[in-house]
Amino acid sequence: MEKSIKDIDKKYIVNTYNRYDLEIVEGMGVNAYDVDGREYIDLSSGIGVNSLGYCEMGWVASVTQQLCKLNHVSNLYYSRPDALLAKSLCERTGYDKVFFANSGAEANECAIKIARKYSFDKYGKGRDKIITLINSFHGRTMATLTATGQEVYHDFFFPFVDGFEYAPAGDLQSVETYVGKGDVCAVMIELVQGEGGVIALDKHYVKKLSEICKQNDVLLIIDEVQTGAGRTGKFLAAEHYGVKADITTLAKGLGGGLPIGAALVAKNCSDTLGFGMHGTTFGGNPIVCAGANYVMARMDEDFLYEAEQKGEYLQEKLSQLDGIEEVSGLGLMIGFKVKDMSSSDFVKEGIKRGLIMLTAKSKVRLLPPLTITYDEIDKALAIISSMLAK
Ligand SMILES: *Cc1c(COP(=O)(O)O)cnc(C)c1O
């Protein structure tokens, strides 16, 4: 008899994921279906990736059309889907140019390289430090792991990459002290720390930070891998803050379910990288870009306004529930604490009751598809509320 998929997975896949006891085989909209045909409301979107839900029809059509026409083309040649995606990203955000990668970590790697080269070009060697925030998350490659300001990620893999310093979020003095030493080329932040517990940075702090960067010709990199592409009810979360970074990185929700990363680069540093200085085989893949182009076309002003409203509604309703505290987040990026249960136990219990959620440290984290309806939100809330009733 064939072994179960769970056994095969455990035997043959490197054991880095502590998976939940759930095998998803199909999805449609906000609903996932497991191997036994059981239906779930999925408030995780594959960690914010399926921004339009599972297998949205127009998205599937765009992707399959492209798939049947041209599956891959090297970056040695021109092609239409990535050029048009870059154009719409720039027109949408005011950035000058885009570099396409395949993941969030890679988009951040590109940002780090641009910042170091920008500073080298203007000031020579030695001005290469990058300040990140304590409790941040920037990825799993060696440099982005080092950039991640959480001690738990800084074990085992020595030596880490040189040139990163960590400042407490909200502490301008700390950043000023580092910058004052004259060897800093960039500050990299998330506006809402996602993995760190869905914690939004203070608006005044972000504005001031942006000013300090400008005054010192230190590049501001905003990692919008999780907050970007409409997640917070604006295309970029930076729009809530009234700031514009020199480099903004995107990934998770941008492709609507296909692997993509993007570094959006402002005019002052859009020509910092030249021929041969950076690249990736898969970056700007036509199928992936066809998916992202469809996502971009769907995310007009009305769509984003709706997402923002639904986010406020969901946050409001959650705050009213007994047994829930510390509701936080922006738009449809939401965290909360459950008074009498750990976040991981709550998520496990949710799966038993047909609801898929995420954790972020001690918080339960929700990243529902931006297309979720009020009716679906109410259904999910009813399950959450039944889980709190004792
Ligand atoms: C998920 C995430 C990353 C890493 O993205 P990958 O695609 O997993 O490499 C980086 N930064 C933030 C803010 C993220 O949420």
Image: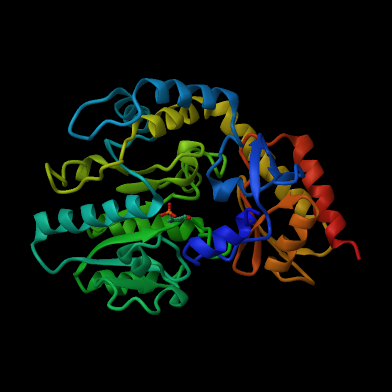
Camera-nearest residue between 158 and 362: 158
Residue at the front extreme of this rendering: 1
Q: In the drawing, does residue 332 fall left or right of residue 17? A: right
Position of residue 27 measured from the top left corner of the image (x, y, whole percent): 65, 38
Camera-nearest residue between 11 and 105: 11
Position of residue 58 measured from the top left corner of the image (x, y, whole percent): 55, 22
Camera-nearest residue between 100 and 32: 32
Camera-nearest residue between 2 and 127: 2
Quadrant of the frame with the N terminus: bottom right
Quadrant of the frame with the C terminus: bottom right
* Residue ID at (39%, 31%): 289
Q: In the drawing, does residue 67 fall left or right of residue 73? A: right
- Above or below: residue 217 compared with residue 299: below
* Residue ID at (31%, 48%): 247
- Above or below: residue 231 compared with residue 304: below
Tell me which image quadrant ligand 1 sits in.
bottom left
Position of residue 36 measured from the top left corner of the image (x, y, whole percent): 75, 46
**What's the coloring here?**
rainbow
Q: Does residue 172 appear anywhere in the picture?
A: yes
* Residue ID at (71%, 71%): 342
* Residue ID at (37%, 32%): 89
Position of residue 4 measured from the top left corner of the image (x, y, whole percent): 64, 56
Q: In the drawing, does residue 261 fall left or right of residue 128? A: right
Q: Quadrant of residue 292?
A: top left
